[in-house]
Image (cartoon, rainbow, N blue to C red):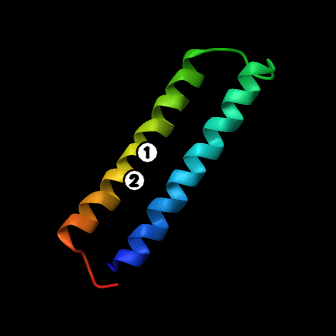
Amino acid sequence: MRINTIRNICFTICILCILASLLLGVAMIWDWIKDSDFIHKSFMTLGVLFVASLLTLTVAKKLGVGGD
């Protein structure tokens, strides 16, 4: 896999996680959804996906996966 492909995939995952977290946060602030374990688990899952995509990109860059 080329580094550009990995970078695009990781960037897309990060942006989607940020947008989903933003929407969940705004929905909680305006009481469109009630605070529950499901919401907390959703935030944690989005955080794990975000960190995993950042780490994947970092490791791929360090190891020099594929050429630019």
Where residue 39 appears, as percent x and y from the top left, is 59, 24
Tell me the residue that label 1 is attached to: 49
Neighbour tally class for label 2: few under 14, some 14-19, many 20 plus, Cα within 10 Å: many
Extreme residue in the left direction: 63
Quarter holding the C terminus is bottom left
Q: Is residue 35 left or right of residue 4?
A: right
Q: Quadrant of residue 59?
A: bottom left
Residue at image position (54%, 61%) is 12
Residue 44 as seen in the image, left or right of residue 16: left
Name the residue at 27% across, 67% down.
Answer: 61
Which percent across, then down, holds residue 8? 48, 69
5 versus 53 height, above or below: below
* Front-lying residue, 61 or 30: 61
Q: Is 5 above or below relative to 48?
A: below
Q: Is residue 21 left or right of residue 26?
A: left
Residue located at (67% from left, 31% from top): 24
Q: Which residue is mark 2?
A: 53
* Residue 36: quarter of image: top right
Using the image, determine if residue 36 lies above or below residue 19.
Answer: above
Q: Quick one: 12 or 34, which is closer to the camera?
A: 12
Residue 50 lies in what quarter of the image?
Answer: top left
Numbered tag placed on residue 22 in the rendering? none
At label 2, the amino acid type is Ser
Which residue is at a point 46% across and 37% down the rendered structure image? 47
For mark 1, give the secondary structure: helix
Q: Is residue 36 above or below residue 2?
A: above
